[in-house]
Image: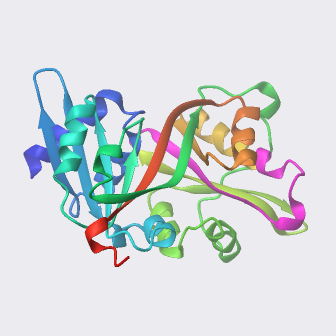
Amino acid sequence: MDSLYIKSIDYLKSDTFRNLTTLKYLSLYRDKVNIKLLETSSDWALLASIPAANLSYDTMNYPYAKEALFINGTSANLKHELLSKLPENNYVLRSNGYLDLSRFEPRFDIEAGHSYISYTCSSMDECYSNTGIKGISHLTEEAIAMISKNGYTGNDLRKYFSNGSVWFGYVENGEIKSICFVYQNYQDIWEVAGVHTAEAERNKGYARVVVASALNYLLEKGLIPRYEARVDNIKSRNLAENLKMHQFLRIDHFLLNPISLNPS
């Protein structure tokens, strides 16, 4: 397992940005991941599987999925070969590029899940460089409550903050109006996540201020920021683009449910 794991990481790191999601999960769940790797003289493909019960996002959004799959590689044919060997089970599959799954329809009902776009930047415009908001390294109950509205559990947050995370809040009259936090995604790539604004305070620009503060914090430390938005979340995407971040990745989720297990 160790040699396969190391070889897989080496392949994925040949394009860290493109394979970022899989690198993150393989690092977090090394003791729970199952890896299949195919190689030729010029191409490779990797299929990683993690029990979905270990992933809070998956259990919340895809409760019937038993396994979370991550497919990466340079060859569509090798990817298809790996997927063709899947045993019957309920899966959520993450793909970082177009992948034709129609050939698997005789075996699986295939349904599109969520899709996400990743953004990054290497510098900030001067108008965002002095927001006055500083990162806070200790979690408060109010901060946990607000960030948790974006799907993070208290355990998730405590784990992130034990590894150097900080949060940024726009505060008025002692109350947090808008919040986000940063955490280490993979090596020097850090995520700007958990953006949430109190419902009564939306459309006032507060989210842009806290996200800009987080970006400044990471850039000043020489880290690479990553911001992720659901494809159908236009406000979140506009926020990234208004801060002049650029897209570098799209991840599509697919639900694969074996037809033979479908009682209908």
How many numbered discs, if any? Answer: 0
Looking at the image, residue 150 sits to the left or right of residue 161; the answer is right
Asked if residue 223 shows in the view, the reply is no
Image position of 112 (left or right of 21): right
**Where is residue 116 drawn, in percent x and y?**
55, 46
Task: Quadrant for the C terminus, please.
Answer: bottom left
Magenta span: 187-209
Looking at the image, residue 5 lies above or below residue 129: below
Q: How is the image coloured?
A: rainbow
Q: Tell me, yes or no, if residue 60 can be seen here.
A: yes
Q: Residue 153, percent across and down?
A: 53, 73
Q: Residue at x 29, y 27 (%)?
A: 14
Query: Looking at the image, which residue is at 85% across and 69% down?
Result: 174
Q: Residue at x 46, y 68 (%)?
A: 62
Outermost residue, front side: 264
Residue 118 location, quadrant: top right
Residue 154 image point, x, y percent: 53, 74
| Figure check: 218 above or below 159 | above
Towards the viewer: 108 or 151: 108
Residue 248 painted magenta: no
Front-lying residue, 200 or 170: 200
Return the residue nearer the eye: 5 or 229. Answer: 229
Q: Is residue 186 above or below residue 160?
A: above
Pick out the residue farthest to the top. 42
Q: Reply yes or no: does residue 196 show up in magenta.
A: yes
Is residue 164 rendered to the left or right of residue 217? left
Name the residue nearer the viewer: 178 or 245. Answer: 245
Quadrant of residue 261 within the rendered picture: bottom left
**Residue at point 71%, 33% (across, down):** 241
Residue 93 x %, y % = 36, 53
